[in-house]
Image (cartoon, rainbow, N blue to C red):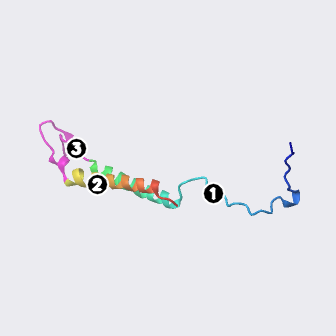
Amino acid sequence: MSKKTNKFSAADFGTDAEAPQEHPFYFGQQNFKWMLIGLAFIVVGFLLMMGADANTVDGKLDPDQWNDEIFSVRRIRIAPLFIVIGFAIEVYAILKRK
């Protein structure tokens, strides 16, 4: 058997060009910006959905009254649309490469 020897000396150490360090974190600044935008859309969507419930009139619970405002366009169409757009932006932010 032959003995393996490396033909390196101390003088050669560090002369090779070192490979650039990879960033250990996947997300960059753009990803976080898009995540915050998506989170803002989701929060606005939930805020638009808030309001009085079906039996609340003028801030008081009245079982004999019906509040038709729970079926408003803002609560049924616009707010869920904002939430879905926010989640789509979140998916884009996660999948976006640097």
Dot 3 falls on a residue whose secondary structure is loop
Name the spot of residue 45 as percent of width and height, x first. Answer: 32, 52
The disc at residue 81 is: 2
Q: What residue is drawn where x is 28% and y is 54%?
A: 81
Bounds of the magenta segment: 51-72
Judged by its main secondary structure, the magenta piece is loop
Residue 10 position in % (x across, y down): 88, 57
Q: Quick check: marks 1 and 3 in contact, CB under 8 Å? A: no
Amino acid type shown at disc 2: Leu
Going by the image, does 62 lie left or right of 23?
left
Residue depth check, mark 1 versus mark 3: number of the one nearer the observer: 1
What's the CA distance linking mark 3 and mark 2? 27 Å
Residue 59's label in the rendered image is 3
N-terminal-most mark, 1 or 3: 1
Q: Is residue 85 magenta?
A: no
Is residue 69 a member of the stretch shown in magenta? yes
Residue denoted by label 1: 22
- Tell me the element at label 1: loop
For residue 40, which quarter of the picture?
bottom left
